Image (tube, rainbow, N blue to C red):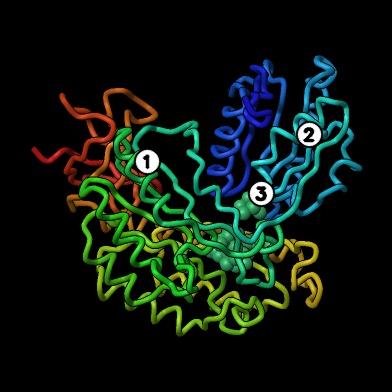
Amino acid sequence: MEISKIATGGGRKLYIETYGCQMNVGDTEIIVSIMQQEGFIYTDKIEEADIILVNTCSIRDNAEQRIWGRLKEFQRFKRAKRSLIVGIVGCMAERLKEQLLEREPIVDIVAGPDSYRDMPRLVAAASAGGKGINVALSQEETYGDIRPVRLDSNGVSAFVSIMRGCINMCAYCVVPYTRGIERSRDPETILRELREIYAAGYREVTLLGQNVNSYRWKNAEGEVVVDFPRLMEMAAAVAPDLRVRFATSHPKDLSDRLIEVMASHHNICKAIHLPAQSGSTRMLGLMNRKYTREWYLGRIAAIRAAMPDCAITTDLIAGFCSETLEDHAETLSLMREVGYESAFMFKFSLRPNTYAARHMTDDVTEQEKTRRLTEIINLQNELSIASNRRDVGKTFEVLIEGFSKRSDKQLCGRTSQNKMVVFDAAEGLGAGDYAMVTITDCSSATLFGELVK
Ligand code: SAH
Ligand code: SF4
Ligand code: F3S
């Protein structure tokens, strides 16, 4: 046997906690796959862990604060088991590098998002009493050949990473620094994964990337042979009853061709997450988003014209550098104009080393950021309820995910628009089945309905 093939895990138990976005959730599944290959055993019980990994997020300061707090809590596990290894992986590891080891002595391993193939060696270094650190970013790594071990899955819907990194350099954002340059995954490996998922019973897949619609796979000559609309067509062709979703798309890359492909495939879900960040063209310029309010609204009009039933959701930031009351009012008016189904809404958090940190002033007070965010959240609640009320009386195709949280006499599942529907269970229907459901009532977060007989 080659030396490299000898399993180094030796049955030691690996526990891993995940923070941040879906990309991190996907990465955790890749880490577990790599570690299992090496003879480590996954556990969801922290008490029995020999290795604790924390897959971290740096997007806002409060995300990092949570992780520092969590590390303090790990001290008691380390006291109870001196051989315990604690590793910080993901975006915060990449951002802080050696500083993590200096600031928190219980940390043994620091591994950035492109170094997961190196995890077994890093664990070996830590087991030998040293520290394991690898924060090299790659221009090629996509983990395309690795079969993720699906954790915490409902067995119906799965996430598949199709690209990594980001080069957009939005002025507020750490992602280009923590995840490196944008690169796309070989479409053959993506399609293979989709076929395997389908064969395993999954009926919905979300294609993931920080800027998923700029996906492009080039041949040896450097020509783009598969772009995002083409990849969507290929994904939709895997099986007529495999739903395809994607997240997150950047407005600047939302092409007419993509809209056309979405509109012409029943199993491509009618839902687009299109982060606007702000409704003010002046702020969008400062944020380096590369579009104006008018241009964004033009994209919304194109989506509505081709797919009147398409749900549109967004991300919004309150209180970016120099944001005035007029700019803020434009965000509120954009929200009304689009009528978002739902939104992720954040207070601006200045991140070290970003363009904003180097060249701008974080001059909106914390109190004012909170006030503006509250206005945005209140308005979105109104819009979400209004959107749900419009669905009452309509009939939707629902992909059942399982029993509802409250009762096993009710099933829950999602519409193509990604809204959760709860309805009475019926003989012969279960997770992974499709059902036609007429909506009879709603709350702000959920639709309630009846099966069409
Ligand atoms: N790649 C995705 C989003 C990545 S981060 C995209 O471009 O759409 C998710 C969201 O976090 C962003 O859309 C943005 O709204 C928010 N965000 C990013 N950096 C932030 C910061 N410094 N402060 C507050 N919110 C931020
Ligand atoms: Fe960050 Fe902008 Fe890239 Fe999204 S597109 S990850 S907000 S830099
Ligand atoms: Fe956070 Fe990194 Fe995702 S910073 S949002 S975990 S890409």
C-alpha gap between disc 1 and disc 2: 31 Å
Residue lying farthest front? 1
Q: Can you say whether 213 is above or below 441 in the image?
A: below
Query: How far apart are the alpha carbons under marks 3 and 2?
Result: 19 Å
Observer-side mark, 3 or 2, equals 3
Of helix, strand and loop, which one carries label 3?
A: loop
Query: Between disc 3 and disc 1, whose residue precedes?
Result: 3
Residue 379 against residue 148 in the figure, above or below: below
List the residue tagged with mark 2. Answer: 71
Give the alpha-carbon distance from disc 3 to disc 1, as whole Å.
24 Å
Q: Tell which circle, 1 or 2, labels the residue nearer the N-terminal end.
A: 2
- Check mark 3 vs ligand 3: CB closer than 8 Å? yes or no: yes
- Residue identified by numbered label 1: 157
- Which three-letter amino acid code belongs to the residue tagged 3? Pro
Q: x, y percentage for residue 256?
A: 33, 77
Q: Amino acid at mark 2?
A: Leu
Position of residue 313 measured from the top left corner of the image (x, y, whole percent): 43, 61
**Is residue 79 placed above or below 305 in the rendered structure?**
above
Residue at 50 percent across and 38 percent down: it is: 148
- Camera-nearest residue between 352 and 10: 10
Residue that carries the numbered disc 3 in the rendered image: 113
Q: Count neighbours of disc 3 (C-alpha within 10 A) and say few if under 14, some if 14 to 19, many if 20 or more.
A: many
The percent coordinates of residue 379 (x first, y second) are 48, 63
